[in-house]
Amino acid sequence: MQTSIISEIPKYNYNAIQESLLLYSENINENYYFSNRLIDDWKSWIGNSYLIESMEDNLQNYLLKIKSSALTLGIEKLLFLLMGNGILILNSDEIRNYLLQHQDIVWGILPICDKIREKFRHSAEITIALYMDNEINDSYLVVYVRQAKYIHNIMDIIDQINDDSEMLLKRKSGWLLITTDFKPPTNT
């Protein structure tokens, strides 16, 4: 079963995670290709367009459920890996819903958060949350970097990470902002 591929990944091994998720999505794409070929074969063999359309609708609905399940599994694995990296997740249900609506950013979040953790090591608390701006009806993910004693160039480091991360988020439906609110970490 596909889920065993992802569950056997060593903790913190991003390359293995990326390869497994790619393999998982390729298998789903192969199912789509196979189903479309199968539908074409049915059409030529049976010739009853009403029956074929009914079968095609059922198969397409089934494949959408498979793809949706894969995305949900991917989001859960992402949240699990983020927590395993010591990243706090605020309002995880809101984040899940946001990621379901903005599926194209799901696979970029882990490498961005890994980069933040690499730059700040354990000198910072990293928190991911959903920011909602009700005035303009907009929302996006925010990663807060908080330190007990703020270093003088924290904004330079954060700006550099934002710049480096832009390629992963370019032309995506969702967004992730890395910043600090200069509050102390919640665990102090």
Image (cartoon, grey):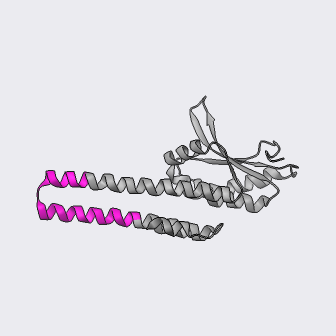
115 or 63: nearer the viewer: 63
* Residue 1 coordinates in the image, percent (x, y): 43, 68
* Residue span colored magenta: 28-57
The residue lying at 63 percent from left, 55 percent from top is 166
Residue plotted at (22% across, 55% down): 55
As for residue 90 lying within the magenta part, the answer is no
Image position of 98 with respect to 43: above or below: above
**Which sits in the foreground, 125 or 138?**
125
Which of the 4 quarters of the picture holds residue 30? bottom left
66 relative position to 37: left or right: right
Q: How many marks?
A: 0
List x then y, in percent, for residue 16.
58, 71
Above or below, comparing residue 140 to residue 45 in the picture: above
Q: Is residue 52 left or right of residue 73?
A: left
Q: Work out which residue is located at the far top of the displayed protein and give it.
A: 135
Q: Specify whether residue 33 is painted magenta.
A: yes
Q: Nearer the viewer, residue 177 or 91?
A: 91
Rendered residue at 45%/63% (across/down): 25
x, y (%) of residue 11?
64, 67
Answer with left or right where residue 133 lies relative to residue 19.
right
Q: Main secondary structure of the magenta part?
A: helix
| Residue name at image x 32 percent, y 65 percent | 33
Q: Position of residue 153 (x, y in %)?
A: 84, 53
